[in-house]
Image (cartoon, rainbow, N blue to C red):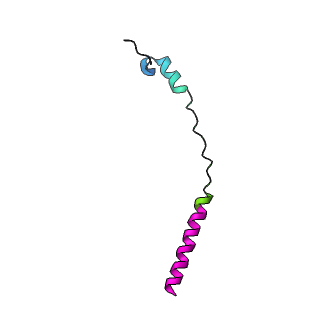
Amino acid sequence: MPETQSDPSGNTEAFRAFVHTPEPEAPVATASRLPLIIGAAAVVVVLVAVAVWLAG
């Protein structure tokens, strides 16, 4: 029963070709961290306001 995929480590030439093939580039994440920063700042403001209200 023949194999459909060849093992690149089977011979030197195939292995070198396998090693030198570039990996496909991952898509660049363009998501901004700004909403996360704004949300965290809002949470901090609310917590400080609650602390001041409880202390007063």
**Can you name the residue that lies furthest to the top here?**
1
Q: From what the image shows, is residue 56 above or below residue 12?
A: below
Look at 62% across and 59% down and name the residue there: 34
Magenta stretch: helix, strand or loop mostly = helix
> Residue placed at 59% from the left, 40% from the top?
27
Tell me the quarter of the picture where residue 45 sits.
Answer: bottom right
Q: Residue furthest bottom?
A: 56
Image point (60%, 46%), residue name? 29
In the image, taking residue 11 as reference, residue 36 lies left or right, namely right
Residue 6 at x, y = what percent?
44, 18
Relative to residue 3, is residue 30 depicted above or below?
Answer: below
**Residue 30 horizontal/vertical position (percent):** 63, 48
Percent x, y for residue 12? 47, 18
Q: Residue furthest left?
A: 1
Left or right of residue 13: residue 28: right
Point out the stretch of residues depicted in magenta.
37-56
Counting every numbered tag in the picture gives: 0
